Every structure is written in structure tokens, then in C-alpha cells.
Amino acid sequence: MAVVQHFDVIVIGTGAGGGTLAHRLAPSGKRILLLERGDYVPREKDNWSTKAVNLEGKYNTKEVWRDAEGRELHPHTNYWVGGNTKFYGAALFRLRREDFREIKHWDGLSPAWPISYEDL
């Protein structure tokens, strides 16, 4: 016989967003369920290797996605507890002037930032 459990909140993924939300809700007394797609990252020396983690993609998914024309895309995605945030490392590409401007997409418009590159 299956055990039926009820939760007030279900958080899917404990990356930056889900983990922060769960932490904020924890003292509320609500019954919270956290769901992860992956397992814990194994404890091993390569965890500390920039080359293994970022260049060789040791922990990346091996999935191949395809666009509408069938072209392959190999996502830089990790399915582990903590999600992509686990491997984030606070390293970002420097923004360009055009990154702050309005951008037209096939399905809409992303508005310009309220500040400019020069403001920074």
C-alpha cells in the first residue's frame, strides 16, 4: 500500500532560486518537499579541478538537445543536488554595451536595462 503524504509547498530544484526559496520558507512551519533530478555530487579530487569541472565538463549532462532543424546542442547543464549553481563559481562573462539595450526576439521584446553600461 502506498503512503500518501501531503505538502504545503513543493520546490523543484535546489539551485539558486529553489534553495533560497526553501531556506526562506523553512521557518514558516509549512511542510516543504524539495525535488531534485540528480544525486549528490560525488566527493572526489576532481571537484576542485577547474579543468575537469569547467573545461572537460566532468559533471555536465551528456544529453544532446536538437533545435527545430535537427541541429545538435550540447547544453552546459548539471543534474545534481544544487543544480547548475553547484558549479557556478561566481564567474561571469563581462557584459557589453549592447547587453544593456532593448533586444528584439522572435517572440517578443526584452526591454533595455534601467541603467547603461556607462553607468557602471
Image (cartoon, helix red, strand yellow):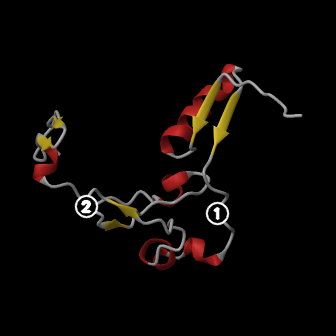
Q: In the image, is residue 51 above or below residue 60? A: below
Give residue 109's quadrant in the image.
top left
Name which residue lies at 47% across and 74% down. Answer: 50
- Give the amino acid at mark 1: Val
Q: Is residue 7 above or below residue 46?
A: above
Element marked by disc 1: loop
Q: Is residue 26 above or below residue 28?
A: below
Give amino acid for label 2: Glu
Q: Which SS class for mark 2?
A: loop
Residue at horizontal 33%, vertical 68%? Answer: 72
- Residue 5 lies left or right of residue 101; in this view the side is right
Residue 37 placed where, x, y %?
60, 51
Q: Position of residue 49 (x, y in %)?
A: 53, 76
Q: Tell me, yes or no, if residue 81 can be seen here.
A: yes
Point out residue 14 in the picture as x, y percentages from the top left corner: 57, 44
Q: Residue furthest right?
A: 1
Q: CA distance from mark 2 to mark 1?
A: 34 Å
Which one is closest to the eye, mark 2 or mark 1? 2
Residue position marked by numbered label 2 in the rendering: 69
Q: What numbered label is drawn on residue 41?
A: 1
